[in-house]
DNA sequence: GACACTAACGAACGATCGTACTATTTTGTG
DNA sequence: CACAAAATAGTACGATCGTTCGTTAGTGTC
């Protein structure tokens, strides 16, 4: 009973690494067994199906994300500082050496966005949760007086997501050495705007 | 001579649709042949390898992107208006019905970013070209006096990419009805900032 | 209408996929 | 130490993968 949990943990940790490199469909039981020197059937027995394996990989990814990004950021004081902490840890996560193929959620999001099933459902839920966490953190920054009360916190969360996605692409695909500087510049502009949101989304609908 | 080209075209167009749904590795010759009622070997003969097929799919995607996004936008006058046209067509492309699984380049970027080879090389080149096109268009907007001369056009292109990526995720994964409004809000804020990059309070409704 | 050439087919290959069974080993416990 | 339970291995299955080969059907040219 003890041993099982332990090797399951080992399998999942390696599966997570592997999934970031070859995707969630590319994640194969045979390959996994080879890498870990287990028999295919022995490994398979831990999960009753591949779908279940994928789900558990997503779950462990979530756990690690909370441990490495969310929880540590909660240690910093409420307000803008916490938003900064979240963002900083987030970018570190995106290019973490323990995730050699990049963020598993980004991979899962593009891979599963049109493949219904529990895996997709889980990714959707995770992403919604994360955006909500970001928005809530921004809201506390408003309460603390760091951000203007006119700030649309959901919009801010959405924009942060865009910054992180662009960062991942710039650093991982384009290997742009300025990737981090670009992300920081976008972030600072966004924060500056949040501090004094005179009219956040008005002034639109010009011309044409 | 003639016939071959024609069916190759048909195959590639369908392969592109399929690739957006199942990914570039998930794109399978058997499935493709089934869908098009061709024999596996007959279809395979058009491309000498799967890698070659993937490459040609990327090429046809590029051609379509230029036809549907870049070229039409060049018909609008230089300056901010052209930046707007590019952005607008870009978002339409991201959710085009002819690409049921989303933008093939976004899929390819996350799928191939750590798989060296000609397919990855092509995606990198395409993405660089596109960002450069965006930056150049922004530069003409500076020349036209629409944007402040202090604007970092590469940064602006990078930010536009983030907006588009976040839009794709919000609309395709989260099915957020506000996705387009979010993207527009981000875009307008970015443009407003570009108009007055040095003095953060001017933002007058001048232009041209 | 014969002829060269291209396009499409059918069958088969070795490999690998996910999964189902049955054994065998390993582990924790009384 | 014995023994039940849990963990792992072994083998086999039907499917499907990319690819090869030899053959048939179709096309365009003199």
Image (tube, coloured by chain):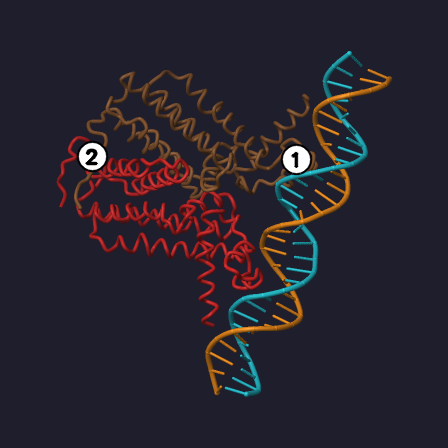
Chain colours: A brown, B red, C cyan, D orange
Residue carrying label 2:
B198
Question: Where residue C30 sits in the image (x, y, percent)?
Answer: 78, 11
Frontmost residue, B13 versus B130: B13
Compared across the picture, whether B201 is left or right of A81 comes to left
Q: Which quarter of the figure has residue A137?
A: top left
Q: Quadrant of the N terminus of chain A?
A: top right
Compared across the picture, whether A51 is left or right of A2 comes to left
Q: Chain of mark 1?
A: A
Compared across the picture, whether B96 is left or right of A10 comes to left
At 31% from the left and 52% from the top, the residue drawn is B69
Residue B167: mark: none
Element on which disc 1 rests = helix
Question: Where residue A139 sits in the image (x, y, percent)?
Answer: 32, 21
Answer yes or no: are tags 1 and 2 on the same subunit. no
Q: Chain of mark 2?
A: B
Q: How many residues crowd mark 1 within 10 Å: few (<14), some (14–19), many (20+)?
A: some
Label 1, label 2: how far apart the Cα atoms are: 60 Å
Question: Where residue A30 sits in the image (x, y, percent)?
Answer: 65, 41
Q: How many residues crowd mark 2 within 10 Å: few (<14), some (14–19), many (20+)?
A: few
Compared across the picture, whether B90 is left or right of B145 comes to right
Q: How many marks?
A: 2
At 44% from the left and 30% from the top, the residue drawn is A125
- Mark 1 vs mark 2: in front: 1
Frontmost residue, B11 versus B161: B11
Element on which disc 2 rests = loop
> Quick check: B10 above or below A189?
below
Frontmost residue, A37 versus D25: D25
Residue carrying label 1:
A44
């Amino acid at each position: 009973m003890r041993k099982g949990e332990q090797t399951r943990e080992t399998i999942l940790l390696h599966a997570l690494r592997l999934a970031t490199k070859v995707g969630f469909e590319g994640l194969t039981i045979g390959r996994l067994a080879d890498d870990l020197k287990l028999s295919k059937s022995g490994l398979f027995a831990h999960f009753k199906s591949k779908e279940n394996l994928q789900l558990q990989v997503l779950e462990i990814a979530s756990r690690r994300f909370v441990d490495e990004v969310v929880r540590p950021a909660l240690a910093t004081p409420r307000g803008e500082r916490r938003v900064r902490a979240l963002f900083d840890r987030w970018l570190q996560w995106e290019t973490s050496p323990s995730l050699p193929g990049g963020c598993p959620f980004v991979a899962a999001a593009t891979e599963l966005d049109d493949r219904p099933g529990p895996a997709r459902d889980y990714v959707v839920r995770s992403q919604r949760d994360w955006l909500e966490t970001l928005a809530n953190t921004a809201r506390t920054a408003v309460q603390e007086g760091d951000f203007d009360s006119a700030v649309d916190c959901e919009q801010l969360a959405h924009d942060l997501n865009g910054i992180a996605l662009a960062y991942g692409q710039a650093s991982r695909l384009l290997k742009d050495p300025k990737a981090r500087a670009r992300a920081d510049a976008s972030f600072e502009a966004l924060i500056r705007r949040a501090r004094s949101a005179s009219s956040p989304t008005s002034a639109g609908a010009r011309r044409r």
